[in-house]
């Protein structure tokens, strides 16, 4: 049973997020998503349109996602990898290199982002 983890805010859920989650799940049998809390978003400098519970409702409905846990800090990944027996850590390649320190604990994979779509682009386009 290969266990995969990824992290993110996943605000205004779009097909770029789904593509990432779909590909992440293909690396194993069980996918955990560390979903950024509203408080952690503040630390990341992000204000999400949907609150944590609303974003969690959306992620829980995705067939690729098996479990959603809160992401409260930058520093919880090693603990999460150990406590959830993670085999593979997956992130979009906008994060390439940032999480290489996790290679000591599990496989680290950076996947190409889906071009042209982002939450900030959606917000910008809707303002027009
Ligand atoms: N993503 C993607 N293609 C897009 C947009 C996003 O593949 N067009 C991926 C990102 O690379 C990330 C995931 O979808 O792996 C979630 O994106 P965000 O919600 O923007 O995540 P972020 O705010 O970067 O949070 O500790 C890690 C952070 O919590 C990551």
Image: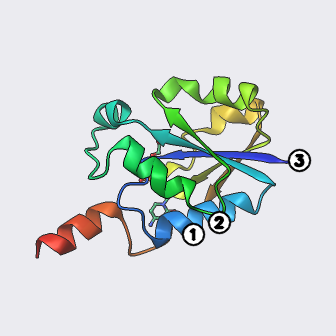
Q: Check disc 1 and report the residue beneath it.
A: 19
Of marks 1 and 3, the one in the foreground? 3
Marks 1 and 3: CB-CB under 8 Å? no
Q: Relative to 87, is 93 above or below?
A: below
Identify the residue shown where x is 73% and y is 25%.
83
Q: Is residue 97 left or right of residue 12?
A: right
Q: Residue at x 65, y 66 (%)?
A: 22
Q: What's the distance in space between the residues labelled 2 and 1, CA to CA? A: 5 Å
Q: CA distance from mark 1 to mark 3?
A: 22 Å
Q: Earlier in the sequence, mark 3 or mark 2?
A: 3
Which residue carries the number 3 mark? 1
| Residue 22 numbered tag | 2
Residue 112 seen in this snapshot:
no
Q: Residue reaching furthest right? A: 1
Queried on whether the Cβ of the residue with tag 1 lies below 8 angstroms from ligand 1, the answer reads yes
- Compared to residue 20, the image places residue 83 above or below, namely above
Q: Position of residue 97 (x, y in %)?
A: 57, 44
Question: Does the CB distance between marks 2 and 1 fall below 8 Å?
Answer: yes
Q: Is residue 80 left or right of residue 69?
A: right
Q: SS for tag 1?
A: helix
Classify mark 1: residues with Cα within 10 Å, few (<14), some (14-19) or many (20+): some
Q: Is mark 2 within 8 Å of ligand 1?
A: no
């Amino acid at each position: 049973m290969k266990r995969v983890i990824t992290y993110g805010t996943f605000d205004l859920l779009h097909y770029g997020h789904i593509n990432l989650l779909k590909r992440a799940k293909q690396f194993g049998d069980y996918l955990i998503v560390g979903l950024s809390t509203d408080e952690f978003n503040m630390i990341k400098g992000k204000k999400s349109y949907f609150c944590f519970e609303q974003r969690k409702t959306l992620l829980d409905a995705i067939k690729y996602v098996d479990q959603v846990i809160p992401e409260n800090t930058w520093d919880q990944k090693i603990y999460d990898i150990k406590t959830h027996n993670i085999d593979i850590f997956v992130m979009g390649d906008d994060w390439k290199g940032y999480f290489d320190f996790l290679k000591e604990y599990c496989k680290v994979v950076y996947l190409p982002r889906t071009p042209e779509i982002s939450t900030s682009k959606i917000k910008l386009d809707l303002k027009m």
